[in-house]
Amino acid sequence: MFAILSVLVILPFYAITIASFKPGQELIRYGLNLKLDFSVMTLHNFVFLFTGDNSYFVWFFNSVTLTVVQVALTLLVSSAVAYGFAAYDFKGKNVLFICVLMIMMVPFEILLLPLYTLTYDLGLMNTYTAIILPGVASAGTIFFFRQYLIGVPKEMIAAGRVDGASEYGIYVRLIVPVMKPAFAAMGILNAMQSWNNLLWPFMVLSDPGKYTLPIGLKTLLTPYGNNYDLLIVGSFFSIFPIFILFLAFQRYFVDGMTAGAVKG
Amino acid sequence: MVKRFLYSQKVAPYIFVLPFVLIFLVFWLYPLLNSVEMSFQQTTLGQPAQWIGTDNYAKLLGDTIFLKAVENSALYMVLTLIILIPFPMLFAVFINYKFMWGREFFKSAFFFPALTSVVVAGTIFRLMFGEMDGSLMNSVLKLFGAGPVKFLKEQSTGFVALVSLAAWRWTGVNILYFLAGLKNIPDEYYEAASIDGASSFQKFTRITMPLLKPTTVYVLTISIYGGMAMFVESLMLWNGNNSPKNIGLTIIGYLYRQGIEKNDLGYAATVGIVLLLATMIVNLTQLTFTGLFRKEE
């Protein structure tokens, strides 16, 4: 049963792989299918992707830059916040934690318009700052890190204090190393989100030179006709970086996810 | 002196959570309050706003296109809940079974679709469910002597495509959540049940399901959120925010249409507030019903 299901899950990947070797007219005429017809297959799409007159690799490197910066900042900020919640008792802690849970339950999309006007008022239109900033204290990531850190013994923190480490020194030298599996899990999930994010960056960015991959690919679809040659091979190619990242960290990813576990 | 203050055990926690507080206030609470304010105004970008009381709300209740969007979002949410909770739970139980062959492979295989962007996944599914005779789905129908079908022109078949897309992308992620939950169930429970002569089915309903409840509640909560807030999937499948007879229009799609495409920010904000209330009501009911509030925390 699982074998059949896995084949079904893999089929769309197979279809897009062979489609990237077919000319765009084939797709317009027949749609996406599983026919392996060597007489029509060509390297034309790949040649055009790498050597033709297109912005694909500008978008590609924009996406790489944005993803790296966004993931690094999100992990740094969210883990510090989560440590604050997990390790200390302080006034207002419960109220603040309810705020975290509230963000998790309210669709981000309803804030699109006020965020849009705010970005406009702050003069942040067309900047990556506007994309990165609202997400650096990611509620889901904070929640996960906190669950993970609750499992860390308080004695470790106390021992750090006895050894004369400062509060921040304890976090940097003792806690961060313990969080490695959690960083791997949340790193992949955040990288996936950042690499694939469409809606908010699409609203913020207007300069084609700043477009990310999903926005760039989307611009290939227009009401006046679709550039399927580039779209299909570009889509096919865009999966690889995140795919490789996942395979490289897969072991830590699953461990990290299960170690933090959802305890409700 | 300042350093000693900042480094004290009393102040340190506030320094740690400060970034969250700032971002919460600036990028969450302020926009939310702003949204509430806008919903009582007639306002467009760059123009002074006018207070119009509850006119937007009154207009919204009689807006048949909005009601169609609500219907679509609700239907999508219910269908994704029916598919994306029981099946991933069962699959996780099978994959968790220690003697199963190839479990690592299945775990990854099911997860791969989640790595694709909605642009890529949407394009693939739009072409697979294309109306041409040769498209993947129509070729399958042909095998059974049916079709061809213009999938994206009708509500029912359009939703088949939309829900397939959701099932394809999210089954693996939910399997992973359930696997995490299963790891927390001690093996002794199952051993004890075996000694008492319990069947596999009894073990599943009496041990696995009750102990997976926190995970199920979590997956349910994020799925309700995801279902109600769906927009980009529909945007990609129909190549724009306009589907025939609005069969693919969602609540966020309507918010986007009013706010960005028609620049009626006040009315769009009203759509957002109504969605916020609806999501909160559904989720709080669900959380009360599943008994989350009765637990320790």
Image (cartoon, rainbow, N blue to C red):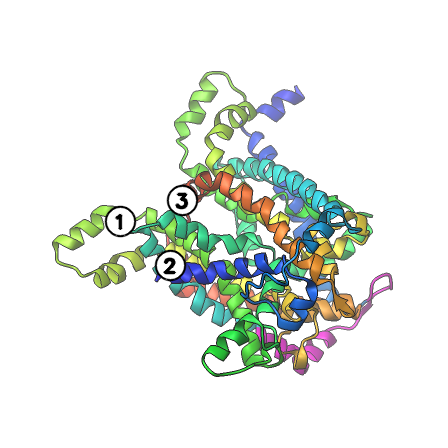
Residue B117 appears at what percent x and percent y?
A: 61, 55
Residue B228 shown left or right of residue A55 in the figure: left
Chain under callout 3: A
Q: Secondary structure at mark 2?
A: helix
Instruction: Indicate the position of residue A233 as horizontal and vertical percent values.
Output: 66, 55
Q: Nearer the viewer, residue A23 or B196?
A: A23
Parent chain of label 2: A
- Viewer-side residue, B35 vs B67: B67
Residue position for label 1: B99
User: Label 1: how many residues lie within 10 Å, few (<14), some (14-19) or many (20+)?
Assistant: few
Q: Is residue B291 visible?
A: no
Pinpoint residue B62: horizontal percent, then vertical percent. Answer: 67, 83
Which amino acid type is marked by label 1? Phe
**B271 lies above or below B108:** below
Distance (Cα) linking label 1 and label 3: 20 Å
Same-chain check, marks 2 and 3: yes
Residue B70 covered by magenta stretch: yes
Between circles 2 and 3, the one closer to the viewer is: 2
Q: Secondary structure at mark 1?
A: loop
For mark 2, what is the residue? A3
What residue is rendered at 45% in x and 53% in y? B109
Disc 1 to disc 3: CB gap under 8 Å: no
Q: Which residues are magenta?
A: B44-72
Going by the numbered disc 3, the residue's amino acid type is Thr
> Mark 2 and mark 1: span between their CA atoms?
16 Å
Quarter residue B280 falls in:
bottom right
